Image (cartoon, rainbow, N blue to C red):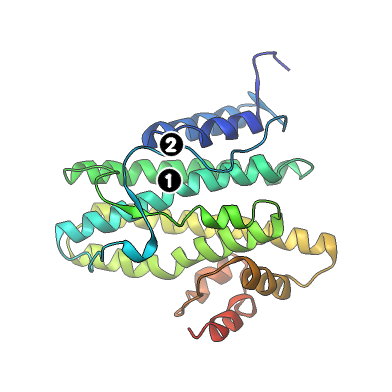
């Protein structure tokens, strides 16, 4: 190995500690390309930060203080919708690198490959959305954003099965449920460019949920537990929100999630 070669943990930490949003996305894409080219070695000599670096803007608010976005009919409401998605994608960059850097030691190489690819996808998604925001006359940071997205990471920081249950299989799977309706509203409003971007994100997110489900099932195989039962127990313990129907069972099934994973939780939570 070259003495100048960085490690996966250092690459992950570099992205996590990059504050500027577009610079974070660019660093994610560059580190993913370096990993794919063999210029990043498998190494875990540094710890992941408890909290990633964030830009000065947007203002981060508690969920109950977030303004309502509307239904994407007006340009203002479409901008607000796309801004919220950009914020989710920015957090998703950090979540993917954190999974790789925090839990990758001792895992198969394919695990690392999967989460670096996810991190690259999330960075590409963020840049696509931010480009569209700029075409609409603004940029990421112009509106307040949800302050609760990193809480799922904090709650599962020392438990890989819990992280895989909550982040890809609850939070990202929720995107599979709601994105088709968002695409339809954007097309109805005449914003085919934004709708096309969300279509790209939707297809990629199926693969991301599938990666989470695949490695979650791998951990269950390793400890002899039932995947659906383990999922329900971990989500009940570590996720404080609700699983709200209607569910996109077709897309979830494409990603390997069967209804016995999540339907009982929706019933329990009053969904």
Neighbours of disc 2 within 10 Å: few (<14), some (14-19), many (20+):
many
Q: Which residue is at the front of the view, 130 or 149?
A: 149
Q: Which residue is at the front of the view, 64 or 166?
A: 64
Q: In the figure, residue 263 lies in which quadrant?
A: bottom right
Q: In the figure, residue 146 lies in which quadrant?
A: bottom left
Say left or right for 107 vs 94.
right
Quarter in which the N terminus is drawn:
top right
**Position above or below: 249 against 198:** below
x then y, percent, for residue 150: 50, 52
Neighbours of disc 1 within 10 Å: few (<14), some (14-19), many (20+):
many
Say left or right for 56 vs 164.
left
Q: In the figure, residue 38 lies in which quadrant?
A: top right
Residue at the spot x=29%, y=43% of the render? Answer: 141
Q: Secondary structure at mark 2?
A: helix
Q: Secondary structure at mark 1?
A: helix
x then y, percent, for residue 123: 44, 41
Q: Give whichever of discs 2 and 1 has the lower sequence position.
A: 2
**Mark 1 — residue?**
90
Residue at the spot x=18%, y=46% of the render? Answer: 136
Q: Which residue is at the front of the view, 2 or 170?
A: 170
**Mark 2 — residue?**
25
x then y, percent, for residue 142: 24, 45
> Is the residue under label 1 in contact with that under label 2 (CB below 8 Å)?
yes
x then y, percent, for residue 230: 72, 71
Residue 207 shows up from this direction: no
């Amino acid at each position: 190995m070259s003495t100048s070669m960085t490690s996966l943990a250092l690459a992950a930490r570099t992205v996590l500690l990059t504050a500027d949003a577009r610079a974070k996305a660019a660093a994610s894409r560059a580190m993913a390309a370096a990993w794919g080219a063999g210029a990043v070695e498998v190494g875990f000599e540094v710890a992941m930060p408890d909290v990633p670096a964030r830009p000065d803007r947007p203002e981060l608010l508690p969920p109950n203080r977030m303004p309502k976005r509307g239904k994407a009919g007006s340009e203002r409401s479409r901008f607000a919708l796309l801004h919220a998605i950009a914020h989710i994608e920015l957090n998703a960059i950090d979540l993917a690198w954190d999974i790789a850097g925090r839990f990758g030691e001792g895992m198969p190489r394919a695990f690392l490959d999967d989460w670096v690819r996810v991190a690259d996808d999330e960075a590409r998604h963020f840049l696509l959305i931010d480009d569209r925001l700029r075409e609409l006359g603004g940029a990421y940071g112009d509106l307040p954003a949800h302050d609760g997205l990193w809480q799922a990471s904090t709650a599962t920081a020392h438990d890989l099965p819990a992280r895989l249950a909550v982040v890809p299989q609850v939070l990202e799977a929720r995107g599979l449920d709601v994105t088709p309706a968002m695409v339809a509203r954007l097309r109805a409003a005449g914003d085919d460019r934004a709708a096309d971007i969300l279509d790209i994100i939707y297809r990629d997110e199926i693969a991301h949920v599938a990666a989470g489900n695949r490695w979650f099932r791998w951990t269950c195989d390793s400890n002899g537990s039932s995947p659906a039962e383990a999922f329900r127990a971990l989500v009940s313990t570590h996720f404080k929100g609700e699983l709200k129907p209607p569910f996109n069972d077709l897309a979830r099934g494409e990603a390997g999630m069967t209804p016995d994973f999540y339907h009982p939780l929706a019933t329990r939570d009053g969904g």
